[in-house]
Amino acid sequence: MQVEQRQAPRRGLGVAGRWLARGAVALVLQGAIVGCDRGGAKNNAAQPAENLSPVPAPANLAAELVMAHPNALWGRIRQIIGGPLSFMPASYPMLVASLLGLPASVAEQIDADVPTLGALTSDGSREHLVLAIHVRDGKQVELALTSGPEARYTSQRDATSGVTTLEAKAGQPGATASLGVLGNYLLVAPTREGLLQIGPYAARTLSTRPAPKEDLVLTSDHNALAGPLRTRLSVWWGDLRRSLEKADQEQRERHGGSAPTFGDPRAALQKADMTFQGVLALMTDLSEGRVQLTVDEAGAHLKAMLKPQSPGGTAAQEFAALRTADATVMLDLPATASVGLLMVDSAELRERSARDQGEAIEKVLAGKLAEAERKKIQEVLASWSKGRGDQLLLGGRISQGERVLFARSTLTDAETLDRGIRSTFELVRVPALAEPLKHWFGEVKFATPGPLEGGRGGVVRAERQVPQVRIDPQTGKAQRGEAGKEAKGGKETKDKGKGTETRTETFELAWSLEQQHASYVIAPDGKNALRELSEKTATLRGEEEVKAMVSALGNEASFALLVMPMRLVGGMMPKAANARPPAAPILVAFGKNDQGGWFRVDAAPAAVRELAKIRPMD
């Protein structure tokens, strides 16, 4: 970033005074040159003035990055996560020096209150990334690494880019990345090629722009989205699709060339490819994609903004088709819920979705459905889509083996929806559907739907045979339990044909149709679960952390998934005397506003700490 040099007003030194001043300056410059020569300069030739004016973007620019206040951001991250990060350097300068293997004298030069900048390029098969870290004096950083008896680096100025590269001397351990200096920026990149190609743009162009208010911002313009990013994603999907096709072909060859009994991967891949192509079409019609990260006392907040290129384009049409609602309806879920899901759509979208789902089922079960069964599936899906309204709210809890699913939707046509619900239980008797359902969920038997006492709706009692498996507390491995013992929710039996220990799990499916809403539950006691959902005596509105996070979505959400992982996992554990885990919510949502579409992820501090403990699998 260039700094304007302002000239002080003259004080009337006169001719003699001005000549004396010039002589003094000449002596100082001569001493500096001699001093540099004594420090090991190869010659006394004058170096050309450093050009720090802005330069054009590099070829295949995919994204630009700005970290507005590096030291403050790192401090908040350490504070929230704690634990493993408490052993890492407390300041951003020392963190950089530690990660790059640089001496403390370089850390002293890093200016952590000035934005760290970055740029990413991609040619479809290879990416280059460079970071530009502001320092107080670039020359001092170069001297700290190249001068003195213990200097481990040599420097060389690249004439084309103007970057002074820093490379480890022979036999000396180098940094963990390629390093360079340009102006008052320390450049860091995985490769020397990226350092020279992208470094000038980061240090000379990005440094002239105002810093954002968010902690970290990543932006891609239309050229990047429609060019290198589209190419890179296409290459990734092509490789993945070919690997899946190869795996499918190998499976077919192992089974004599026949297709799978349930679900044809080729049909699923075709559907996935259509979806992916739709995502590409939307992405290439954006004028800008912006991802921003903010970390504060409420947790970590990641938000992506997607701005359409033109009012009548693909992206604008997709965003216009979204329906949104006040997300705080999620707070009406029972306080015992550990998962919540809100979906908002339109009658047109529901009709199209029902049609697509019916076609997908037909493809998956190709050749296994009679014409009457195919029509029945379409009728049931159509009844659901026409009967319910634009909003669908789901919630669930797991508590010491008890599983409950809550659902509530707006209501358009009570009679049609009731018919669709009752017809659903007839579909499970269709052989083509019953066999895969048994494979995934075990054998389920549904009784005839009965009336709902005191209201319009119904109740269905069901039984499910599930394999009895227990977890050994010592080894954590699954083990078969002993038959003949009672278990919560059912009774253990033994399959005489296969000798497999099973447990009969009983539960109820109940629904209630009111004037404007429909409520649905799956629980051991359906009527009590319906009452819990409708009375709203204890809801998530009492959870301040959840309330603040959900309320921030306003009325612009089209989809929202709320998960309280600590409670979800805690509910799967054996009953203990310890207190109920904190909510520690994670919220994933998308919707639209007057600028375009958006996507966001919010995580409470406790959730961030737990996520930080997860280690990637080998």
Image (tube, grey):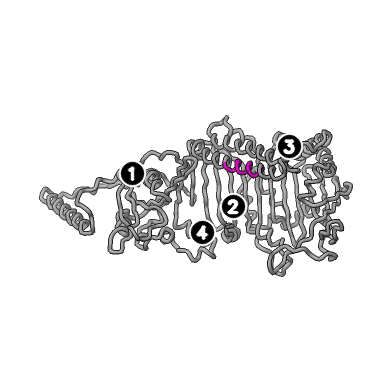
Mark 3 vs mark 1, CA separation in Å: 57 Å
Query: Is the C-beta separation of discs 3 and 1 under 8 Å?
Result: no
Coordinates of residue 390 in the picture (x, y in percent): 71, 40
Residues drawn in magenta? 239-248
Residue that carries the numbered disc 4 in the rendered image: 77
Query: Is the C-beta separation of discs 3 and 4 under 8 Å?
Result: no
Q: Nearer the viewer, residue 443 or 605?
A: 443
Label for residue 363?
3
Quarter of the image where the C terminus is located? bottom right
Mark 2 vs mark 4, CA separation in Å: 14 Å
Residue that carries the numbered disc 1 in the rendered image: 161
Give the residue type at disc 2. Asp
Does 161 sit left or right of 69 as displayed? left
Q: Nearer the viewer, residue 56 or 603?
A: 56
Residue at (74% x, 60% y) in the render = 399
Question: Which of the two labelled residues, at mark 3 and mark 4, occupies the earlier sequence position?
Answer: 4
Give the residue type at disc 3. Lys
Kindly indicate the quadrant of the structure image that contains residue 246: top right
